[in-house]
Image (cartoon, coloured by chain):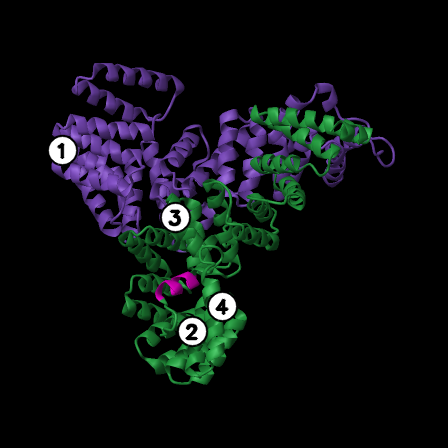
Amino acid sequence: MRTRITIAAFMAVGLWLRTAAAMQPQARPAGTPGSSFEQLSRAADQARAQNHDDEAISLYERALELQPEWDEGLWNVSSLLYEKEHYAEARDRLRGFVADQPKAGMGWALLGLSEFQTREYARALDHLRQGMTLGTGGSQGMARSVFYYAAVLLTRFEMYDESQRLLFEMARSGQTESFLVEPVGLAALRMPLLPDEVPYDRREMVRLAGEAALAANDQHRDDAEKLFRQMAAGFPNEPGAHFLYGAFLMDLRPEEGIREMKRELEISPFHVPARVRLAEEYVKEGQVEAALALAAEAVKLAPEDASTHLAWGEALSAKGDLSGAVRELEAARDRAPDTVGIRWALFRAYNAAGRSQDAAREKEAIEKLAQTGSQP
Amino acid sequence: MLVLVLAAPPVLLAEQKSLDEIAREADAARTADRMQDAIHLYRQGVGVRSAWQDGWWWLGSLYYDQDRFPEAQAALTRFLTLAPKPGPAYAFLGLCEYETHDYTHSLEHFRKWALEGSPGTTELIDVASFHWALLLTREGRFVQSLFLLAAKAERRGGSAALTEAMGLASLRMTFLPEDYPAEQREKVWLAGEAAYYFAVQQADRAEDYEDKLLLHYDRAPNVHYFRGTLFGFQKKREAAKEEYRQELRISPQHAPAMMELARLDLDDGQLDEALSLASRAASLDPKNAAAQHVLGQTLFAAGQVQKGAEALETARRLAPDSPSIRLHLATVYRKLGRTSDAEHELAVFNALKAKQGVLLPPEELQELAHDQPGRTK
């Protein structure tokens, strides 16, 4: 997907940067502009207003030579350069712009988008997130692009759950789902690839996974199941396929879900989420020893992953080992302090262990998180 | 003192005072996190006195922190012309040059930084050695690159960027992470994960990724060569040989696979095959010191001492800093009765060995760990 962002999308920032009077197109002075900053900047603005982009860029560049920190000029030239797909140049100008205007969400967002195009993915993700935090000035097109690219990058950086949350949020807010199918499929299958990087022979699998996950998210369970089954049957030896189908089945028909998870572990013996989901299910079914073994393995494989400590903590709690449960749940909380589910589990464990003060503190934290709308 | 002050030209006094004031304000702005003000003041300061070393240094650092690499590069370049002890500045400059795609100078400055003993914080060492490794991969110096990357993996653990870098080097792809073909991404990721887990000594997880790599890329060039090297490290000689042979079925001109196979054959005393492979590798890649080195060792082992010396001399010419080539050459010279030449090579060997840990290529370090003076394979 390529993003086209019109100059109109940048007007919010433009307005914020300059007075309304200064925004009005000026009459173009006859002949070549003079060499003073005022003359050059006025001529640049005028060329931009008349869609003479190349001329505007050149004039902005000349004006910026005289006043390198001229924010409005930096912004205007950056947006023009981006529009013309000169991403590296846009990026360099935007870096100067955000250094001077660190609260300009649009600036960070456009910088992130430029860096995406120059394939500086780690920086792109950081800056898109910064843009999301600060806001993109009410531009829906920009917000959509920023969310989309942040989500696909989160998947590439193996932050699949965060990516899925973002993508489902986009789907709920009425984004065209066809546009989200591949990114959702990749995140669901836990493949750290951008949509453009999907190998040809796995395109169909990714499509099925994405459509199924979106259908499940929309509560269209029959459609989802049909698609998941088709995916697992069509790609029986592919890592990730059975986990995904199993995770879906776990809520409907746990026995079948367990079977799919076990199949996944045969294909991917180090699959952490499959272990975590199985452990959770075994706790529900009262198979505590099996749950403990799987959760302990998951922690060993991914000690920095909060979900593994949560699973182990819940399993220990089910066994009656409250001090062990608290230890693991605290470890989970330390790794994901904004995850409400972990806080609730810890709250229950503290209560069960008679640590009422600690429980009260957790409750307070949960209430605070609920106000800020954090992760479930 | 008074005389000196009075003797100073009035203009210099004014400049000095003004610069002191600017410097104080700039430092205060910097420590108060008012970075734009600090940049403005340091720029003002270097405008007042263009030889103000600290001013250029801080300008370079502040621009670097803001990812403004062209500006940082210019400031650090200026700083380096003034600083008698550049310390970590070479690394920062190398990083800026990487970002501005001035790769030749970037490599040069990373090398200079290493020669100074890699000064800087652990974060700088990690970042600089990582980017240096990326450039080494781009240059086709995969072993050196992997040596640096594996060291980082052991120190810092994994990351998506490290995986990608290790994947490119493992598959001998002369690309940077920013410019390799998108359709190769999965292959690079899988190889990178295998290499990473191997580096952190989790061979079973490495194997899992190797299996996944083979699932879709069994016929892709360099995949079996990569597996061969992993088996080689594990001393699984037969498995390694099989992988190299498989690579040669897929890529019949794969000189590195020939070299590795020749090395293993040489160790196993299979001199005919070793000689045939080493000769082919050396003729396919005549400027490759390692190929000439293996050929020289093989010829020597096969009793062709004079020819062995010639191949090793070629290797020495291609890689004059290689201690192991010197060591093997000393042995061959001794056999030829060229005692003074042998002593000379041994002396050079000892001098080069002393450079261990600075710039010695990692394959040399590996060889040195196993070799003793006077011994050859």
- Quadrant where the C terminus of chain B sits is bottom left
In screen coordinates, is B9 left or right of B266?
A: right
Q: Nearer the viewer, mark 4 or mark 2?
A: 4
The CA distance from mark 4 to mark 2 is 12 Å
Within 10 Å of disc 1 (Cα), the crowding (few <14, some 14-19, many 20+) is: few
- Of residues A331 and B360, the one drawn nearer to the viewer in this rendering: B360
The secondary element bearing badge 3 is classed as helix
Within 10 Å of disc 3 (Cα), the crowding (few <14, some 14-19, many 20+) is: many
In screen coordinates, is B177 left or right of A8?
A: left
**Precedes in sequence: disc 4 or disc 2:** 2
Displayed quadrant of residue B82: top right
Query: Which residue bears the numbered disc 3?
Result: B153
What's under tag 2, amino acid-wise? His
Residue B174 visible in rendering:
yes
Within 10 Å of disc 4 (Cα), the crowding (few <14, some 14-19, many 20+) is: some
Q: Which residues are magenta?
A: B363-370
Colour in which the image shows chain A:
purple
What's under tag 3, amino acid-wise? Ala
The structure residue drawn at horizontal position 51% and vertical position 68%, both measured from the top left corner, is B319
Displayed quadrant of residue A284: top left
**Precedes in sequence: disc 2 or disc 3:** 3
- Of residues B195 and A227, the one drawn nearer to the viewer in this rendering: B195
Query: Which residue bears the numbered disc 2?
Result: B328
Say if the magenta span includes residue B261: no
Q: Nearer the viewer, mark 2 or mark 1?
A: 2
